[in-house]
Amino acid sequence: MPGRTGKSFLEFHDLPSDIILSLLDRANVLAGAWADRRMPQSLERKHVALIADDSGWRNTTAFSLGVQAMGGICVQAPISFNAREETADLAGYLDNWFDVLIVRTKLLTTLRELAATADAPVINARTKSNHPCETLGDLAYVKSRRGSIGGLKVVGVAPDANILRSWVEASLALPIKVTQVYPEKWHVRDRDLSNANFSTSIDMKELLDADVIITDCWLDDTAQAQLRDYRISAATLDRCRPDTIFLPCPPVARGQEVTTDAMTHPACQSRAAKAFLLHAQNALLEWIVV
């Protein structure tokens, strides 16, 4: 949704494809600037609130570091949503001080309410429903390796949860194909996400011609018997194309969604890809404040 400023980023497909593609290109430029320790001061005199109303650390840490590296002031506001204060009241107080609100919280509906009532744009730093910044970072990395994302085939060996759902959101906005490979019990069935670029399957042979393979953690230990055949191993990756990029989403549980040897396979590029979380988020912040 656009929010009151028109620049909130709550779901991946909030942004048109041309803006997303420009952000991926800019992320690669900023990656070079980061390596050279010559970051543009694009956020100078900008005040950014970082609200972590849920667990996790990677993208919130990257946001804090990125804001400071580009000359802005980042303040961690210890706010809990859906408690004593109304979200609309919190929005008003935050607007007194901040130009951008970066929020990690459980409910996407909370972010929608915040974006609808705040003057400052709101960035989704993760909800239980989706994680668009994670997907933006991964796509920036993939583009840096391939030169293009046109016609990309992404296979998600993952349940209907926030990581996969953001990739499906991306398939609504970009010329990429996303296929979920998982037992039917955990397939994405949300009609709002249904589109010609997204499909579901139970067949692991879908991985053989994938450009990108992603995984997410198993939902609970009781599912192990049903999910054993969907565990990614080095042998699985050996059967894939030699240029396949394997991006297991952290935190990774070795012995569940992946084996230990899959994490050291040449196709596994998770560590390098997560570096681009910083660069993609920096590109997003630049676009929002300019």
Image: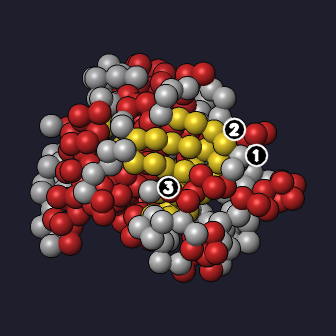
> In the rendered structure, are the residues bearing label 3 and label 1 in contact, judged by CB atoms less than 8 Å apart?
no
- Classify mark 3: residues with Cα within 10 Å, few (<14), some (14-19) or many (20+): many
Q: Is residue 202 visible?
A: yes
- Kindly identify which numbered label has been placed on residue 187: 2
Residue drawn at x 30%, y 55% is 143
Q: Position of residue 162 (x, y in %)?
A: 58, 43
- Kindly identify which numbered label has been placed on residue 210: 3
Q: From the viewer's perspective, is 72 left or right of 181?
A: left
Look at discs 2 and 3 and give the one toward the viewer. Answer: 3
Residue drawn at x 60%, y 21% is 191
Q: What amino acid type is highlighted by mark number 1?
A: Pro
Mark found first going from the N terminus, 2 or 3: 2
Q: Nearer the viewer, residue 286 or 166?
A: 166
Image quarter in which the N terminus is found: top left
Q: What amino acid type is highlighted by mark number 2?
A: His
* Residue behind mark 1: 183
Q: What amino acid type is highlighted by mark number 3?
A: Ala
Q: From the viewer's perspective, is 170 left or right of 256?
A: left
Q: State how many labels appear.
A: 3
Structural distance between the alpha carbons of marks 1 and 2 = 7 Å
What secondary structure is marked by label 1?
loop
**Quadrant housing residue 189:** top right
Look at discs 3 and 1 and give the one toward the viewer. Answer: 3
> In the rendered structure, are the residues bearing label 1 and label 2 in contact, judged by CB atoms less than 8 Å apart?
yes
